[in-house]
Image (cartoon, coloured by chain):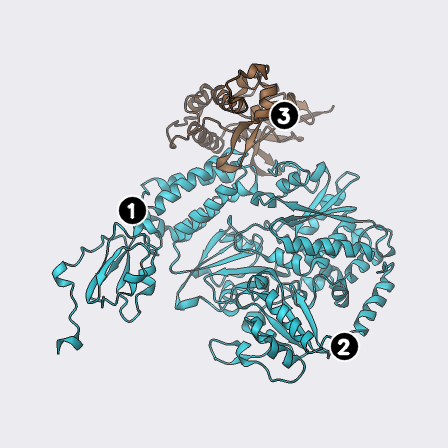
Chain colours: A brown, B cyan
């Protein structure tokens, strides 16, 4: 595979063709924050924390670095006033859901995000989709998915599948950036449902 | 029915159809578009047909049931031919007179004619009614002359002649060049030049390429694409097939909302008939070009009108957008080059091929060519679909064609471009309508929604309404749209309910900036538009809500109260009897008082109070005056003083 020359934060790098800006930056040791990215999964482009500025034919635009493929002579900036504003606001919006998430709090400190800026939300889930995508793409189980859309969107386990697949897996729990609490909670609730007689899910 | 194997055969068939038709034969043309059907045109059609059958006139009088004619405010519409007399708001009971006139036995039915409100004169012909007179119905006009279920009607008007010309007389490059030269811009939202999109797809690597009709029209109040697809489905198929030929596609899709059953029915029938007659399938018109079309019914998510979400849904997955850093024209459905245009854009293509780009570019402005169909709704006298040349002013659309604002109210703003468009104020009424002109003033063309608002409309509440719509329709994949619009909606709701506070506008502006910059798709990127455009032109209304807890339009319920002016009240009991909340205390000869605790602010009392008293006041931003003392509430009428 041929090499592509690109500039990140003023430094020239040669990287493999076909990789994303995020992957390129990580390879050369430049940190770009993300919440929904996972190396073993297809890029999602949902959290928008990895937004960076790229210059193309004299135009500057914000792009999600996890889904933007590197091009020859691409000029990338990973920190700017605008980028920081986007990241700060996104973190504040998410901290309304998960104010105690260690991962979010570390980033909040970096970007000066106020965890109390928005009224607290009832659900911890920040919809990074890691559990849903991991279950589908890596495990092929589809035991957990999204329900509804927009602001009403929630993750939910499919009781019939979860009862069969999840008890011995639970590999999604450590992926959850808001700790596994939410996933565990939803899982428990879902598993209790088909076993209303009180049987342990392990017997399923 | 036989297949038509060449352009010469097509012309033969067309001449055959025309030779069998007598233009002088009486014909009752009835609008059976969705809006007229809702107003009862099916019943009118049944009555007319029954009347014809009863008098054994089946061979003497034709009945033509067409798609939407546009003047939906006054439907069901009947047009009598060959005289071209237009009747509005026709009822089943009018059938005997209509049929009698068709037989030549009766005069024109005056009561069903359009009356010009300014001159009080009756107008005989559809084309002379101001609503139609100032339009330029290049694309939409055929709707009124064909039965959408009849391919013969379409062929009689010269249907598929553009297809024949393109397939047998032009190379794909020549077709592409013509469309590029016409500068046809997409009528579905962004106004991207169709020719450039086609060229990108044509040049993109890939064996399989696709052309797609976007009929997922979802803007509140908009039904242009619906009416075109329902009323003239063959024209869309013709445009799509020409596009497929130009880019080298052999498969096409029509992505249509499930909520448009008549459009689905008519287009499915059109595809079947077009296949039978050789306009779709293999070796179309003997040209050697193969093309098939499949209808995909969408499940009704607004976001599926967005190209990448539409294509994801077409693939059978959840209709969520994906990043488009590589255009869908290069990597679209199943990662293949795909050209997506909306219904109206495709409908323009046969015209461009038939009459040439030079003809097409004669209409319009420098950068926006041709016509545009708008759905003119809201506080407007003539609700309906209007097709106007680009460059016409908003004032002409709203006042000349639309007939102005009903009830003597004052125009306040017009919202264009669908929920993510913007509100344009009175001082910009002379703006010439075009893609860039609308964007420059903070709104957009969108697919052509045009919602007119009068002085009673609260602009803050309007912005809140559209934001609510977008928040509800957000897919939820990306944070700025899912969480950002939700927070914006919370703040906007607080403002309209009197809980606005200092700093709200700045926070809304910040959330807008983030949503515009960082959202995944156009829905999130444009979601702040309703707020930003109303803030730009109506900042004083926001400030009144936040600082004075006052709604200048006296429309926001929480900031408005109703009060009976004791000086004006004549204790007539009308409001007392009509109040659904029993919130009015009063009796005959006892001045009425509204119990503010019980009042639900429905406004019934305000509406029913006789104008000669006009005693009910709507107040906002000031305290409700104290109730009149009990001892002063008795009215002593002059007649009883004697």
Task: Name the mark nearer the viewer: 3 or 1.
Answer: 3
Query: From this viewpoint, which residue is outermost toward the front?
Result: A197
Chain letter of the residue carrying label 3: A
Q: Is residue A52 in sight in this rendering?
A: no
> Residue B505 in the image: x percent, y percent?
37, 43
The answer to whether dots 3 and 1 both sit on one chain is no
Foreground: B187 or B93?
Answer: B93
Task: Name the mark nearer the viewer: 1 or 2.
Answer: 2
Q: Is residue A41 left or right of residue B416?
A: right
The mark that comes first in sequence, 1 or 2, is 2
Chain letter of the residue carrying label 2: B
Question: Which element carries disc 2, helix, strand or loop?
Answer: loop
Residue indicated by mark 1: B547
> Residue B31 in the image: x percent, y percent?
62, 67
In the rendered structure, are the residues bearing label 1 and label 2 in contact, judged by CB atoms less than 8 Å apart? no
The answer to whether dots 1 and 2 both sit on one chain is yes
The answer to whether dots 2 and 3 both sit on one chain is no
Question: Which element carries disc 3, helix, strand or loop?
Answer: helix
Residue at mark 2 to residue at mark 3: CA–CA distance? 65 Å
**Position above or below: A195 against B221:** above
The residue sitting at 58% across, 53% down in the picture is B447
The quadrant of the image that shows the C terminus of chain B is: bottom left
Q: Which mark is residue A136?
A: 3
**Position above or below: B150 against B206:** below
Residue indicated by mark 2: B22
Residue at mark 3 to residue at mark 1: CA–CA distance? 51 Å
Residue at mark 1 to residue at mark 2: CA–CA distance? 70 Å
Foreground: B314 or B421?
Answer: B314
* Dot 3 crowding, Cα within 10 Å, few <14, some 14–19, many 20+: some
> Residue B240 in the image: x percent, y percent?
73, 52
Q: Quadrant of residue B233?
A: bottom right
């Amino acid at each position: 595979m041929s090499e592509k020359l690109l500039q990140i934060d003023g430094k020239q790098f040669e990287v493999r063709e076909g990789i994303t800006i995020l992957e390129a930056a990580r390879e050369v040791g430049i940190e770009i924050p993300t919440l929904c990215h996972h190396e073993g999964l297809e890029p999602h482009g949902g959290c928008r924390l990895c937004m960076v500025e790229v210059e193309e034919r004299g135009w500057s635009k914000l792009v999600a670095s996890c889904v933007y493929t590197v091009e020859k002579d691409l000029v990338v900036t990973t920190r700017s006033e605008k980028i920081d504003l986007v990241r700060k606001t996104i973190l504040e919006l998410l901290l309304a859901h998960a104010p105690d998430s260690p991962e979010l709090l570390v980033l909040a400190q970096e970007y000066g995000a106020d965890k109390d800026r928005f009224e607290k939300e009832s659900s911890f889930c920040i919809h990074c989709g890691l559990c849903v995508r991991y279950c589908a793409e890596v495990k092929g189980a589809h035991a957990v998915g999204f329900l509804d859309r927009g602001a009403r969107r929630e993750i939910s386990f499919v009781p019939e599948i979860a009862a069969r697949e999840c008890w011995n897996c639970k590999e999604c729990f450590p992926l959850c950036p808001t700790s596994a609490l939410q996933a565990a909670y939803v899982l428990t609730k879902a598993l209790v449902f088909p076993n209303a007689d009180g049987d342990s899910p392990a017997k399923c | 029915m036989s297949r038509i194997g060449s352009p010469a055969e097509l012309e033969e068939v067309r001449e055959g159809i025309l030779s069998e038709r007598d233009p002088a034969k009486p014909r009752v043309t009835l609008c059976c578009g969705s809006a007229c059907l809702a107003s009862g045109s099916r019943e009118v059609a049944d009555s007319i047909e029954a009347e014809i059958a009863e008098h054994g006139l089946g061979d003497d009088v034709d009945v033509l049931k067409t798609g939407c004619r546009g003047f939906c405010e006054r439907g069901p519409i009947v047009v009598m031919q060959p005289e071209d007399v237009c009747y509005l708001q026709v009822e089943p009971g009018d059938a005997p007179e209509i049929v009698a006139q068709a037989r030549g036995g009766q005069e024109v039915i005056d009561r069903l004619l359009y009356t010009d409100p300014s001159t009080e004169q009756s107008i005989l012909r559809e084309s002379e009614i101001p609503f139609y007179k100032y339009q330029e119905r290049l694309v939409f006009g055929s709707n009124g002359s064909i039965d959408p279920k009849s391919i013969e009607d379409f062929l009689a008007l010269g249907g598929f002649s553009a297809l024949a010309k393109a397939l047998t007389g032009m190379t794909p490059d020549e077709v592409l060049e013509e469309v590029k030269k016409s500068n046809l811009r997409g009528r579905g939202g962004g106004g991207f030049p169709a020719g450039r999109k086609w060229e990108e797809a044509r040049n993109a690597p890939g064996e399989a390429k696709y052309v797609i009709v976007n009929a997922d029209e979802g803007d509140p109040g908009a039904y242009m694409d619906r009416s075109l697809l329902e009323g003239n489905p063959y024209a869309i198929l013709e445009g799509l097939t020409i596009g497929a030929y130009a880019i080298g596609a052999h498969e096409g899709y029509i992505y249509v909302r499930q909520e448009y059953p008549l459009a689905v029915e008519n287009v499915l029938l059109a595809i079947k008939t077009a296949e039978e007659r050789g306009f779709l399938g293999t070796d179309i018109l003997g040209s050697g070009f193969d093309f098939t079309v499949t209808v995909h019914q969408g499940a009704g998510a607004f976001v599926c009108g967005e190209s990448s979400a539409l294509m994801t849904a077409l693939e059978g997955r959840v209709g969520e957008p994906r990043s488009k850093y590589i255009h869908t024209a290069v990597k679209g459905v199943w990662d293949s080059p795909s050209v997506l245009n909306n219904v109206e854009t495709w409908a323009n293509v046969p015209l461009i091929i038939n009459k040439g780009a030079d003809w097409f570019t004669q209409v319009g402005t420098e950068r926006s060519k041709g016509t545009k169909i708008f759905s003119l709704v809201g506080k407007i006298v003539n609700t309906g679909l209007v097709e106007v040349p680009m460059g016409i002013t908003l004032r002409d659309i709203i006042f000349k064609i639309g007939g102005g604002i009903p009830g003597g109210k004052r125009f306040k703003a017009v919202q264009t471009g669908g929920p993510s468009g913007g509100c344009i104020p009175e001082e910009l009424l002379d703006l010439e309508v075009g893609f860039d002109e609308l964007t420059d003033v903070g709104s957009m063309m969108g697919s052509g929604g045009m919602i007119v608002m009068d002085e009673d409309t609260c602009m803050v509440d309007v912005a809140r309404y559209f934001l609510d719509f977008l928040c509800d329709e957000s897919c939820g994949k990306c944070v700025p749209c899912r969480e950002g619009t939700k927070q914006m909606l919370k703040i906007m709701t607080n403002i309209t309910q009197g809980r606005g506070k200092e700093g709200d506008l700045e926070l809304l502006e910040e959330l807008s900036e983030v949503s515009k910059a960082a959202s995944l798709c156009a829905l999130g990127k444009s979601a702040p538009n309703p707020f930003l455009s109303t803030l730009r032109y109506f900042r004083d209304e926001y400030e009144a809500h936040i600082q004075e807890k006052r709604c200048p339009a006296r429309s926001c319920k929480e900031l408005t109260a109703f009060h009976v002016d004791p000086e004006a009240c004549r204790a007539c009991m009308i409001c007392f009897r009509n109040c659904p909340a029993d919130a009015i205390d009063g009796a005959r000869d006892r001045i009425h008082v509204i119990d503010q605790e019980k009042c639900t602010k429905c406004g019934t009392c305000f509406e029913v109070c006789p104008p000669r008293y006009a005693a009910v006041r709507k107040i906002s931003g000031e305290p409700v005056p104290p109730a009149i003392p009990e001892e002063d509430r008795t009215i002593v009428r002059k007649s009883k003083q004697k």
